[in-house]
Amino acid sequence: MPVQTRASNHPEIELVIDTQTNSPLPNHTTSTSTTRGLTIKPFIARFHAGYFRISLSLCSQALLWKTLRDPTTTATSTPLHRVFRTLLPSAAFTVLWSLSLLTLISLSSLYALRCLSHFRLVRNEFKHHVGVNYMFAPFISWLLLLQSSPFIPPTSTYYLTLWWLFVVPIVALDVKIYGAWFTKGKRFLSAVANPTSQLSVIGNLVGAWAGARMGWRESAMCLFSLGMAHYLVLFVTLYQRLPGGNGITAKMRPVFFLFIAAPSVASLAWESIWGSFDYFSKMLFFLSLFLFVSLVSRPMLFKKSMKKFSVAWWAYSFPLTVLAIASTEYEQKVKSTTAHVLMIVLFLVSVVVSFLLMVFTGLNTNMLLPVDDPYSS
């Protein structure tokens, strides 16, 4: 009994052995497993509207070649026009146009599949301050390809039908984007504006350019005024935010070249509406030329973006090509030695850049679909 009493006075220690075998993994293992699961995405899910940079480049390049081979300018052709027609037969232009068409059809088909199978991702892209602007790119590409077509003249019914088919989505996107700018005010625009926002302006201007070519000047003037009104607001907003580069990452800095594209396309659109490359077209061309010099004189701005290949590199080609097209129209109007040399230089730069981009893309196909943020590369 005394022993029992002493034993009862000591605290009892209970050992509990956990025999559960399905305990979770450590935190770092779980997060790694989850991360690996999230990085494995289907091909279509990783495709986005930013890849239409490629079609913008090829379709504008086809239009440049057609401009230099246009038989209507034979009477006032320059040595470059004659050399271009001599060295490059019409079959070469047809091959380039066909390549542009095949690329654009492929990209459009892939994005259509993305809309059908991953609509949630498309909706998120539509709400993204950069992604929504690239939704103008496929329709801009189709309008450029339509203008460069060797088979559909601007006077045909097919041209008119296709023009409406590509312009209506641009106007619908305008209502969404410009409506938000107008109703939500300055703070909203300052928060979402970035260099890719100029694609919305370029869409209107390309639509005006293509419409004026078929003689629909009133519709072209409507699109032109809509685009230029918002370009003035956007240009001032971006000019104030340019030093900080807000809204885009360092890898996406090639899109700064869109500053060149907007006034270049505007000069070409106004030339088609007015019927000649007048003073207003020249002013817009000189503005784009000044912005081009401003950008190429600051190579350090693009140093980080050039360390590793990405589809963002294609943002260089389209602005340079439309600037080259504008220079051909300027040379035709002025007919001076300086304008002729300038046209040759811009043409060569545009062709070389486009060719190098095709080579780099072919050599880096494994890097075309990164698994990170689609608009950070």
Image: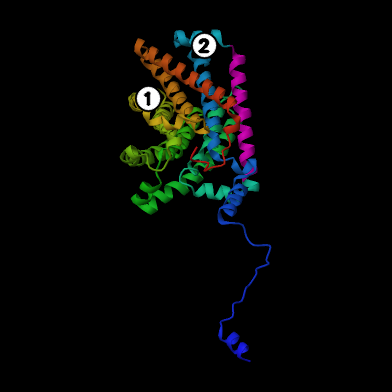
Q: Which mark is residue 84?
A: 2
- The secondary structure type at the circle numbered 1 is helix
Q: Residue at x 59, y 28 (%)?
A: 156
x and y, in percent, of residue 174 in the image: 46, 44
Asked whether residue 231 is drawn in magenta, I would say no
Distance from disc 2 to disc 1, alpha carbons, whole Å, reads 27 Å
10 or 125: nearer the viewer: 10
Q: Residue at x 56, y 38 (%)?
A: 370
Quadrant holding the N terminus = bottom right
Marks 2 and 1 close (CB-CB < 8 Å): no
- Using residue 6 as the reference point, say whether residue 79 is left or right of it: left
Residue type (three-letter) at the residue carrying disc 1: Val
In the image, residue 13 sits, relative to residue 123, either above or below, namely below
x and y, in percent, of residue 319 in the image: 44, 28
254 or 107: nearer the viewer: 254
Residue 334: image quadrant is top left
In the image, residue 76 sits, relative to residue 176, either above or below, namely above
- Using residue 16 as the reference point, say whether residue 341 is left or right of it: left
In the image, residue 73 sits, relative to residue 4, either above or below, namely above
Sequence-wise, which precedes: disc 2 or disc 1?
A: 2
Q: Which residue is mark 1?
A: 296
- How many numbered discs, if any? 2
Residue 254 can be seen, yes or no: yes
Q: Residue at x 56, y 81 (%)?
A: 11
Q: Which residues are magenta?
A: 89-114
- The secondary structure type at the circle numbered 2 is helix
Q: Which mark is residue 185?
A: none
